[in-house]
Image: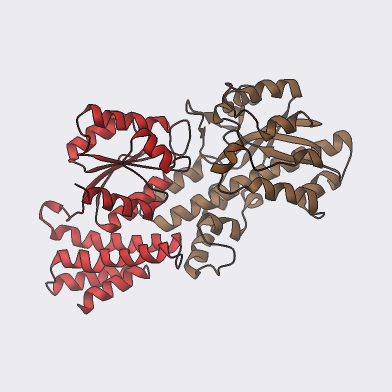
Chain colours: A brown, B red
Amino acid sequence: MRDVIKMRASGIMPQQEDVLGLQGIPPDRKPPKNAVLLLQQASDIFGTCARPIGIVEDISKDEFAEVYKGQSLNAKETPVDEIFRKAEDLALFAITIGQIVHDKINELFEKKELALASMLDSVASAGAEKAADLVEDHFSCWLVNKVGSSSTRAAMRYSPGYCGWHVSGQKKLFEFLRPEEIGIKLRDSFLMEPLKSISGVLIAGKKEIHTIKDTYPFCAQCETHSCQERVRALMYDSGCSREENWSKR
Amino acid sequence: MDLLRRISEALQTGSIEKVATLTKQAIEEKVVPRDILDKGLIAGMSVIGDRYKKHEIFLPEVLLAAKAMYAGMDILKPMFLKDEMPTLGRVVIGTVQGDIHDIGKNLVGIMLRGAGFRVIDLGKDVPPERFIEVAKKENAEVIGMSALLTTTMPAMKKVIELVKKEGLNGKVKTIIGGAPVSAEYAQHIGADAYAYDSINAVDCIRGLVQKP
């Protein structure tokens, strides 16, 4: 399977709390009126300027082992290293929301529309995550077609630069996936362009394999520990979208 | 003075037109331009900074206030000789070579200007030599570097090594920031300071320029 997934900007419009969270506004605080107005403006611009597109390609365990090895700079022990060996299916993916949004953010900063530029940047970041979610859903659909629906299995994504997977792993990921096809380039510093792009691996298998401890040495530097939240959503939330995506679509 | 207090208050609410009108009024009433700047605009941004630190307000409100401040500064600028605004110090900032993230660096620039610093923003993907060249040319007191990738962090060390090599050590202070950077890393590479966000950067840089 190697699929290019074209998405609509409206389909990856992020939730208000996700964007405002990136602006430092906690979910338990009533957002200031002007922040909500800015969010509306930024969302409108995002709706016009975003060109979300993704690519996903399945990969064997042996092939992924080579990709994951990268330049041998990963942490000694990593969750991905443990999980992928127990997986049933793997796929590499990349998404971008395109260059136009990035250019618009810069343009707004230059015009001293500082608050709007910053808000659009947050909308774009949260929107990119939503685009990655859609690619994850696409992969789940593919799995349903391949192995049938299951409520005991789940897929999760992991990206270079996180959880002990050294960012230089991007090089081999790009060599295998070739996301240049959808307009994503890799710089020498392993930075993707356009900036609002996400790449990584989708790991599918029994839900239990996704259990991750957050006590690896590199976890001390992680501010969010969002892995725990993602795993909990997989394990305990019977109505979660991931499960529905795999079992019903 | 009441007018200066009103400028400060208008700025705090992000009221661009009001700040512009009141700044013009202050000029017409022959208020000393330096006072309009210090006791009106910068005083307003200082309150904003304090409220942000206390989590009473958030980034959007800070940036709306900053825009109002720029509106006032644009009117005030011609009042100063050679267009040179009074400054707390000159700071060269940029995102280091190999990195093209610049939102964080832009926010630092905005907050520094709001605090009364002159900021020379070199943009993104800035070669180490460029930081030195401009710091020398502008007689800067501080070089501020930003990075968002672990792979581009070593470029910060190169700049600091160049500062020493060029005999600027002590004369030009260095400060670093960005998601993968830490106080420990700053110490490790010999940077003079580390800032965890844009408001903290202002406090740190204020400290650096006051140090002998």
Q: Is residue B71 left or right of residue A83?
A: left
Give me the residue at 47% from left, 67% from top.
Answer: A34
In the rendered image, is residue A8 in sight?
no
Quadrant into which the N terminus of chain A falls:
top right
Give me the residue at 43% from left, 65% from top.
Answer: B54
In the rendered image, is residue B148 in sight?
yes
Residue B113: x and y, percent? 28, 54
Q: Eyeballing the image, is A189 above or below A120?
A: above
Residue B25 placement: quadrant? bottom left
- Taking depth in this image into account, of A89 and A57 the one nearest to the observer is A89
Q: Eyeballing the image, is A191 above or below A225?
A: above
Residue A149: x and y, percent? 88, 42
Residue A213 placement: quadrant? top right
- Taking depth in this image into account, of A117 and B130 the one nearest to the observer is B130
Quadrant into which the C terminus of chain A falls:
top right
- Taking depth in this image into account, of B132 and B11 the one nearest to the observer is B132
